[in-house]
Image (cartoon, rainbow, N blue to C red):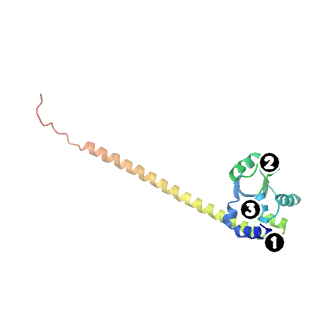
Amino acid sequence: MHAGSKETSLVLAATPEFIGRRIYIIRGKKVMMDSDLAELYQIQTKTLNRAVQRNIDRFPSDFSFRLTAQESESLRYQIGTSKIGRGGRRNLPYVFTELGVAMLSSVLNSDRAIQMNIFIMRAFVKLRELLATNKDLAKRVGSLEKRMKEQGKNLADINAAVNKLITLNTPTHDAIGFEI
């Protein structure tokens, strides 16, 4: 496959859904891995990380951070990356928040970086909208569950009252027949 067709396939694949599958929640923040961003920008991961290191003052901890060994291992199991030092990564990966991704376009300063950042920003916005929708749905379900519990309690109270009335109103009849 030559570079032109790979570029075309990445542009076609760079939908918010495609990018959204590469957004992870780590330390309570939505982030993208350096290797995923490098793939989208069509550069090597080490090139991306070098550009960041040359401009480190533009990437405070709320823009980018390096994963711990434990976080990297956990993520490796989730997405199936190769073990550090086994032909894959030699260093712990960097991850970038939405703000960090926006800053990357100014550091990389290429048409491709700008184009991909537009796609990535749209994916972050879509993810935020989905999370807001899910919170609203969770709130509604919680409200329905609460109402169902209240109705269940009311039905149990009614059932207990009916059973009490049945036992109170049960007539006592004298037995029919002979006593021996």
Q: Nearer the viewer, mark 2 or mark 1?
A: 2
Question: Residue drawn at (76%, 64%), measured in percent from left and top?
Answer: 40
From the viewer's perspective, is residue 33 above or below residue 71?
below
Dot 3 and dot 2 residues touching (CB under 8 Å): no
The residue positioned farthest toward the top in the image shown: 180
Residue placed most toward the observer, 68 or 21: 21
Q: Is residue 160 left or right of residue 16?
A: left
User: Dividing the picture into quarters, in which one does residue 131 lie?
Assistant: bottom right
Residue placed most toward the observer, 62 or 30: 30
Location of residue 85 in the rendering, given as x and y in whole percent from the top left corner: 81, 47
Mark 3 / mark 2, whichever is N-terminal: 2
The residue positioned farthest toward the left in the image shown: 178
Circle 1 Cα neighbour tier, 10 Å, few/some/many (<14 / 14–19 / ≥20): few
Q: CA distance from mark 3 to mark 2?
A: 30 Å
Q: Total label count?
A: 3
The residue positioned farthest toward the right in the image shown: 54
Kind of residue at disc 1: Asp
Kind of residue at disc 3: Glu
Kind of residue at disc 2: Arg
